[in-house]
Image (spheres, grey):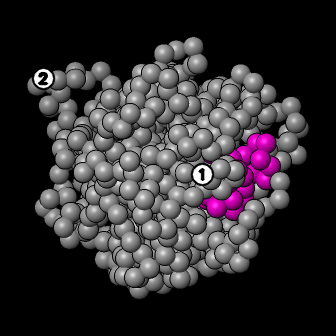
């Protein structure tokens, strides 16, 4: 029997970037907020300080900052005809767990998605005709615009100490930035990070080829910084331990040292760790949620936390899973294409090439999450004709270093033995003298890429696991083929000693190998409840006092990393709740 607790104004499920932002903003508005996080609490001083944090075995191999797959995981398959099997060890993506969530171990890539994504169906149909989009590509507009998101992008970038160079400032194209970005109202809060040799070589060659390279915008502080909330950042140390690690210098914008500590200072806020939410509760009408049910994973005790507003702010797939377990919204059926919860799972894809230069010293161990240069010539605008290649979407191309670690980073040319004295000699020779170029594109939605509940396997609390049915489709293969062509053209112009060429693979997706943590979709946003789970305020169409915030609301994937948009959406939803919903609780958008 669950212990029923005293009702609060807001319960927040998951305490990463979105949960931290909403907790801070709503407690400042005078609301009593309880945040439930199923992982542990942490801090930079206690958990991410040198030398403990520089432990590749602990954080990369053993996934200490990630969700424990022995307790909760998902099952995966490529097609509905296959049997889905559990991911027993984290592979393709790495959901974070603990206070700060994936905002602890991310690399910091902070991008502004634009109307090229938000109005994707309308723009493609206008340019190429309605028959251009494949019938099984369940593509739709989002219902929001870049113009209304711009101030929220700016707010997140300033809170997260984003370093970069504007390329489009109030419509003026500036040298050194991304000329294809949408217009910004102001410069980045910090200048770009220091450049590394690999990125400079790539940028020089790309510019000579007519492309437009620029430093990757990233939430790694290029110099000491105090954000608008008063949080102090140290300058990036280029330590080489970024992706999958907490930041030892408080230089990487992370919620555990920005928004969450501010919320914790407010007496209206309470954080409960080791609290695994298992169900969102509804009233007898089914049109309003009343709170959540959760289990303390240390004691096994079950509690009911009543609340006037419920916010789902966990990792994207966990938000969708909880909606399914709670019976909120109709589950998606790919055969009849009815229902919405689970629809439009999207991901990342992209080829890469490896260049080897005798006589070069790249020092890959000195890098940050954003020490790359990028070209956006094949994504950010209509500056090339997609119809020549037959796909929807685009890709960015980048080079530099992120986290080239002592155990895992072993670049060797093709044909090198995978063990023994020859392999050892090759790793010693090429470690310093190798660099990579990669392309990244977003997966477009497909009727057979979706989530549902697995009929066989259960998690540690006896609940059905999430089942993911997913594979790359023809659209992604075409983008990868084009991306590989661009990579190889640039790589050959750099005159490497040896080249491991990029290739546009048509191999099926596998859950076993890490590719990206940028999962999206499953409870998508829109302007019509027939084709979306939440409205443009990220409010559930089914229960007006339930808001769902995360990349799970994206109707499709994109070439840009998602965190900048996720953070901006969280600030926008916080504003909508404070300025509109609290004054008149109910549906904010008419169907």
Residue 523 part of the magenta segment: yes
Residue 577 part of the magenta segment: no
> Outermost residue toward the top?
81
User: In the picture provided, is 280 more to the left or to the right than 515?
Assistant: right
> Outermost residue toward the front?
1
Residue 280 in sight from this viewpoint: yes
Of the pair 533 and 366, the residue shown nearer to us: 533
Which residue lies at the image location 58% right of the left edge and 66% below the top edge?
Answer: 308
Circle 2 residues within 10 Å: few <14, some 14–19, many ≥20: few
* Place of residue 429 in the rendered image (x, y in percent of width and height, measured from the top left): 19, 38
Of the pair 87 and 542, the residue shown nearer to us: 542
Give above or below for 392 relative to 142. Answer: above
Which residue lies at the image location 45% right of the left edge and 42% below the top edge?
Answer: 516
Residue 344 in sight from this viewpoint: no
Q: Which residue is mark 1?
A: 282
Q: Find residue 260 and name its label.
A: none
* Place of residue 280 in the rendered image (x, y in percent of width and height, measured from the top left): 53, 50
* Place of residue 380 in the rendered image (x, y in percent of width and height, measured from the top left): 67, 54
Span colored in magenta? 521-547
Identify the image quadrant of the C terminus. bottom right
User: In the picture provided, is 214 more to the left or to the right than 91?
Assistant: right
* Principal secondary structure, stretch drawn in magenta: loop
- Looking at the rendered structure, the secondary structure element under dot 2 is loop
Name the image quarter holding residue 476. top right
Give above or below for 84 relative to 496. Answer: above
Name the image quarter holding residue 165. bottom right
3D distance between C-alphas at marks 1 and 2: 61 Å
Name the image quarter holding residue 248. bottom left
Q: Which residue is mark 2?
A: 420
User: In the picture provided, is 12 more to the left or to the right than 170?
Assistant: left
* Place of residue 51 in the rendered image (x, y in percent of width and height, measured from the top left): 13, 61
- Looking at the rendered structure, the secondary structure element under dot 1 is strand
């Amino acid at each position: 029997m669950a212990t029923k607790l005293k009702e609060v104004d807001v319960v927040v499920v998951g305490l990463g970037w979105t949960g931290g932002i909403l907790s801070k903003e709503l407690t400042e508005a005078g609301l009593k907020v309880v945040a439930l996080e199923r992982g542990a609490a942490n801090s930079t001083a206690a958990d991410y300080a040198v030398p403990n944090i520089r432990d590749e075995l602990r954080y990369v191999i053993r996934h200490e900052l990630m969700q424990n797959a022995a307790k909760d995981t998902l099952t995966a398959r490529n097609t509905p005809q296959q049997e889905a099997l559990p991911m027993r060890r984290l592979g393709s993506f790495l959901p974070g767990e603990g206070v700060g969530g994936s905002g602890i171990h991310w690399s910091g890539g902070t991008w502004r998605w634009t109307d090229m994504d938000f109005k994707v169906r309308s723009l493609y149909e206008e340019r190429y005709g309605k028959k251009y989009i494949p019938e099984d590509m369940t593509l739709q507009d989002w219902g929001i615009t870049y113009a209304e998101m711009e101030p929220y992008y700016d707010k997140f970038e300033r809170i997260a100490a984003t370093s970069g160079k504007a390329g489009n400032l109030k419509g003026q194209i500036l040298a050194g930035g991304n000329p294809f970005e949408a217009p910004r109202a102001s410069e980045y809060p910090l200048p770009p990070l220091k450049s590394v040799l690999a990125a400079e070589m790539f940028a020089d060659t790309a510019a000579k080829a007519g492309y437009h390279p620029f430093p990757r915008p990233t939430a790694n502080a290029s110099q000491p910084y105090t954000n608008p909330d008063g949080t102090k950042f140290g300058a990036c140390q280029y330590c080489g331990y970024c992706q999958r690690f907490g930041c030892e210098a408080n230089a990487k914008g992370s919620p555990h040292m920005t928004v969450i500590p501010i919320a914790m200072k407010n007496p209206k806020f309470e954080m409960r760790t080791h609290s695994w939410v298992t169900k969102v509760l509804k009233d007898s009408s089914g049109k309003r949620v009343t709170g959540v049910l959760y289990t303390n994973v240390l004691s096994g005790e079950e509690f009911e936390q009543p609340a006037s507003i419920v916010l789902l702010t966990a990792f994207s797939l966990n938000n969708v899973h909880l909606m399914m377990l709670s019976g909120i919204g109709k589950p998606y059926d790919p055969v009849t294409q009815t229902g919405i919860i689970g629809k439009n799972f999207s991901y990342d894809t992209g080829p890469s090439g490896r260049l080897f230069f005798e006589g070069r010293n790249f020092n890959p161990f000195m890098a940050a999450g954003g020490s790359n240069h990028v070209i956006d010539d094949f994504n950010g605008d209509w500056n090339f004709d997609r119809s020549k290649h037959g796909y929807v979407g685009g890709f960015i191309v980048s080079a530099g270093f992120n986290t080239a670690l002592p155990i895992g980073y072993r670049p060797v040319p093709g044909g090198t033995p995978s063990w023994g004295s020859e392999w050892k000699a090759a790793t010693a020779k090429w470690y310093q003298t190798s660099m990579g170029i990669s392309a990244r594109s977003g997966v477009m939605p497909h009727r057979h890429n979706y989530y549902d509940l697995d009929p066989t396997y259960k998690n540690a609390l006896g609940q059905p696991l999430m089942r993911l049915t997913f594979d790359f489709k023809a659209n992604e293969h075409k983008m990868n083929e084009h991306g590989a062509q661009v990579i190889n053209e640039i790589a050959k112009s750099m005159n490497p000693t040896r080249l491991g060429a990029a290739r546009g693979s048509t191999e099926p997706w596998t859950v076993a190998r890490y590719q990206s943590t940028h999962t999206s979709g499953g409870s998508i946003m829109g302007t019509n409840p027939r084709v979306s789970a939440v409205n443009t305020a990220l409010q559930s169409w089914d229960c007006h006092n339930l808001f769902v915030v995360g990349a799970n609301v994206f109707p499709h994937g994109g070439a840009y990393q998602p965190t900048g948009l996720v953070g901006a959406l969280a600030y926008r939803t916080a504003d909508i709740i404070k300025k509109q919903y609290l004054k008149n609780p109910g549906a904010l958008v008419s169907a």
